[in-house]
Amino acid sequence: MAKVQQLGYVGITSADLDAWSAYATSVLGQEVAHDSDDQALFLKMDEYHHRLSVHPGDEDDVRFVGWSVGTPERMQALASQLDAADVAVTAAKPEEAADRRVIDFVHFVDPHSGVRNELFYGPEVIFTPPFHPQRAIVGFKTGDLGLGHFVTFVADIEAAVTFYEEVLGFGVSDWIVLPGIGRIGVFLHCNTRHHSLALFANPAPRKKVHHVMM
């Protein structure tokens, strides 16, 4: 079966892009990409054009999550696996791919978390000038490991794990189990990073995103 390879990028919405720009540079140490504007704040942390993007919106929450799949053939194979699982898949419009700075992607809504997921290939990479942290840190561990990890909520954690294992090719690294309650959380890997995705059982979360690790 076809599998995703890494967490490529995360897009969020926020009512204050200026505050995010200040936070990203002074606290996270990221760089603001030169072509950011009032519709998209692109934040760099390695050779990718960006790993995090912030877009105007009234609600501070995740907007989309992008998973690198490596090739167009793998993207189409994953789309077929989603279709076979009765999950609607939509091809990206050219302007959407241009916004993500990738060659192409398809997207679907995770039936368990409600998060829009994008399966892409061909990210824009910029080697010169190299990424330069905006505060005194060494940098970020990305490369084949990807951005880091994304954590969200699902109503039925067992069904969600089955979906990510059997449709997208993730593997389980660890479960969080509470005595007398059972499984309430799970860590899923798609490469050698311990986990690129984590799910927590919550039928009515305030937001779709719990956190993003960089």
Image (spheres, rainbow, N blue to C red):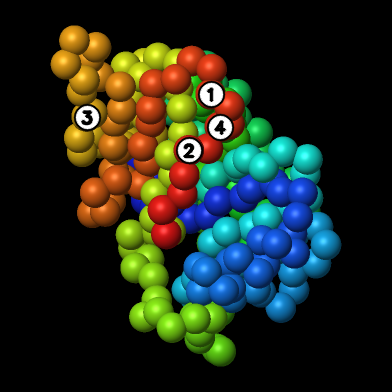
The amino acid pointed to by label 3 is Trp
In the displayed structure, does residue 21 sit left or right of residue 147? Answer: right
* On screen, residue 199 above or below 57: above
Q: Nearer the viewer, mark 1 or mark 3?
A: 1
The residue wearing badge 1 is 205
Crowd band around label 2 with a 10 angstrom C-alpha radius: few (<14), some (14–19), many (20+): some
The residue wearing badge 2 is 210
The residue wearing badge 4 is 208
Q: Which residue is drawn at the image coordinates 77% and 44% (left, top)?
A: 57
In this rendering, the count of numbered labels is 4
Res. 175 image quadrant: top left
Numbered disc 1: secondary structure = loop
Between the C-alphas of marks 1 and 3, the distance is 20 Å
The residue wearing badge 3 is 175
The amino acid pointed to by label 2 is His
Numbered disc 4: secondary structure = loop
Between the C-alphas of marks 2 and 1, the distance is 9 Å
Camera-nearest residue between 103 and 182: 182
Q: Which residue is drawn at the image coordinates 46% and 34% (left, top)?
A: 152
- Which residue is at the far right? 38
Crowd band around label 3 with a 10 angstrom C-alpha radius: few (<14), some (14–19), many (20+): some
Disc 2 to disc 1: CB gap under 8 Å = yes
